[in-house]
Image (tube, rainbow, N blue to C red):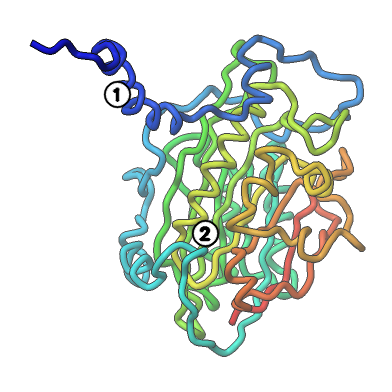
Amino acid sequence: MRRWAGPPPLLIAVTVLGILVAPAVSRADAGPPAIEQAVLAGAEPAPTSTSPATPSATPTTPPGRSGGAATRDPAAEAGSEEDSEPGSDATATATAGAAPGARPQVPAIAPQKIGVASFNQYVQLSDSAGLEDALDLTSRDGVTIVGWQEGFAAGPTYQALEDRGWATKRYVRTKGSRELAVSWRKDRFALVGSALHKLADGVAEGDGRYPFGTRYALRVTLRERASGELLSVINTHLPQRIENLDVPGTWRTTKNALRAARQLDRLAEIWERAPGRWVIGTGDYNIAALADQRARNSGGVVAAYAGVARSSYALLGFRGLQPTHPYSGRFIDYVHLARSAVRQGRIELLGQRTPGGLNSDHRPLVVRLKLS
């Protein structure tokens, strides 16, 4: 009998096992390493003296339940997206085709001009002050869509806008989901569908230095009435205390920053799947846009959206604009446009402004767009 002259059988078995397991390990979610190591090691620093004292950008709420990434309309809300006019998300997806980066060329249509605003309503405002701000913003010339943040108790405000020709979509199952809303002029758009995506668990009192509630993204898909084409709006709000103000545009070593980086990564995936000829985004990102552009922070807004969207700041700059957060002098409120739609000429950015005179601690960012 001839003896086996090759490698020992045990070595062969270990090698085969390593080949099978390695791909799965390489796909594991490692998170943003620069933050991950410091935060998990308990290196979360005390507030620095250089951080300006600002009104809290996020109310203190306990963390939400863990679960699936997307939630359809809750039974507690009157009128689900399946009942909205006309059709449903299935119709929207069939009309839209593939993700923005892979969409084929589409035929031209008559250009339509719209105005999109992103506005943090500031949770500590009185009902009357919040309503005054909302009526002021929605009455401004050319504003046709608004993405709202911190609208936890703004239901009566949105109802008042109904009588002035506006419709609003929001989810009311949890406190975290109630803060986001998207409003639009009913004479310009009709609701097709929506989805609420859970992006990151919050940080509870005692678990982190700066508690915040569960974070979501609200996606609303509308039909532009003149053309019949679809437009999706993706609205979100990142946690507070995530930017290192000693080195602007970089992450702080807080649990908030760790969750925000993951939130941005998941937002990019939502952008890739959003239906419609046009996709735009609104939100309070709590990261200074100018500093983020300069720092090219790993996992920051510019880096996370590199393949899917561009901000109005990246396209037009900051000349003539007042900061959207006057207390810190930063531009932390954004409007984003789908990169493919900009490149193919389906969305043209005509201008932007940050109007003042409102009660909130934020100025809204208002952009003018031409859709074609």
User: Residue 13 sits in which quadrant?
Assistant: top left
Report the residue that reaches farthest toward the front.
2
Residue 81's place in the image compared with 260, above or below, is: below
Closer-to-camera residue (279/103): 103
What is the x, y in percent for residue 167?
52, 64
How dense is the environment of label 1, judged by Cα within 10 Å: few (below 14), some, or many (20 and up)? few
Q: Secondary structure at mark 1?
A: helix
Residue beneath label 2, please? 168
What is the x, y in percent for residue 131?
68, 53
- Residue in the image at 44% along x and 57% along y: 273
What is the x, y in percent for residue 303?
67, 46
Instruction: First in sequence, mark 2 or 1: give its number.
Output: 1
Horizontally, residue 116 falls left or right of residue 246, namely left
- Residue in the image at 58% along x and 68% along y: 340
Total count of labels: 2
Q: Which mark, by number, is residue 16? A: 1
